[in-house]
Each structure stands twice: as structure tokens, then as C-alpha cells.
Image (tube, rainbow, N blue to C red):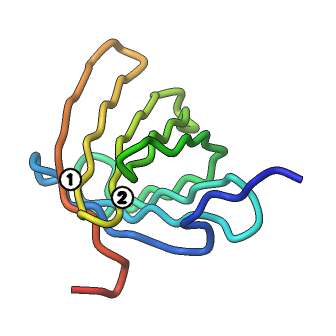
Amino acid sequence: MATLFPHSGQSFTLTMDNGLQIINSYHAENDLIRVEFLSGDLTGTVMEIPFQWRELADGSFLLSWQESDNNTVVHCDNFKTGISYAYYTTMTGDFYVMEGKIRPTGGE
């Protein structure tokens, strides 16, 4: 049996330095992420997609997935410190580097 992501069954709001705000919800039973865009060009878009993860030595997690529109995402998220580093590549070749805050959805 595969090991579940330690934050399975939890949701987090990410607020990035470019104004993008999303909710990442991790499925309770498998490695699926539900991404809901709260701001930006994709406001209102919801995607549920498989993701890969790896825990790093400092308690951060390296997360990656390919969205339904084939854009790719890589995050280095530390849920204890509340910091996210995100790298986003579009199918048209645009590349974005973002830093932001992570907080449990519904939390302050």
C-alpha cells in the first residue's frame, strides 16, 4: 500500500506575491489534488488532478502536477512555516516564479 501524503484530507489557501489566490485540497484517500482558482485569469476554475510529492529534509514538500490544460506546476511548500514557492509553466512557454503564504482553509 502506498504512503498517503501527510496532508491528505486537508485544504489550504495559498496567497501568492503576484495576487493569485487558490485553494489546494488534498484528497483523503489518494494522491489527487483539487485546485480552485479564487483570483486571476482562471478565477472560478476547479481542477482535480493526480499529483506527486516528496518530503524534503527541512519539513518542506516538493509537489508537482500537470493541470487539465497541460500547464505544469511545481511547489516547494512548508506547511509549518506557511511558505510556498511555486513554479508554473504554460503550454505557450510562459514561466512564472511565485512566493506566497499557506494557511489552512478557513483559518486566519
**In the rendered image, the vertical position of residue 104 relative to residue 81, given as above or below:** below
In this view, the residue in front, 32 or 52, is: 52
Residue 20's disc is: 1
Marks 1,2: beta carbons within 8 A: yes
The residue located at (58%, 55%) in the rendering is: 33
Residue type at mark 1: give it: Leu
The residue located at (21%, 86%) in the rendering is: 108
| Residue 38 position in % (x across, y down) | 30, 64
| Residue 19 position in % (x across, y down) | 12, 54
Residue type at mark 2: give it: Phe
**In the rendered image, the vertical position of residue 7 relative to residue 91, given as above or below:** below
| Residue projecting furthest to the right | 1
- For disc 2, the marked residue is 37
Which corner quadrant of the image does residue 101 belong to? bottom left
| Residue 1 position in % (x across, y down) | 89, 53
| Residue 43 position in % (x across, y down) | 32, 57
Q: Residues within 10 Å of mark 1 (few under 14, many from 20)?
A: some
Q: Secondary structure at mark 1?
A: loop
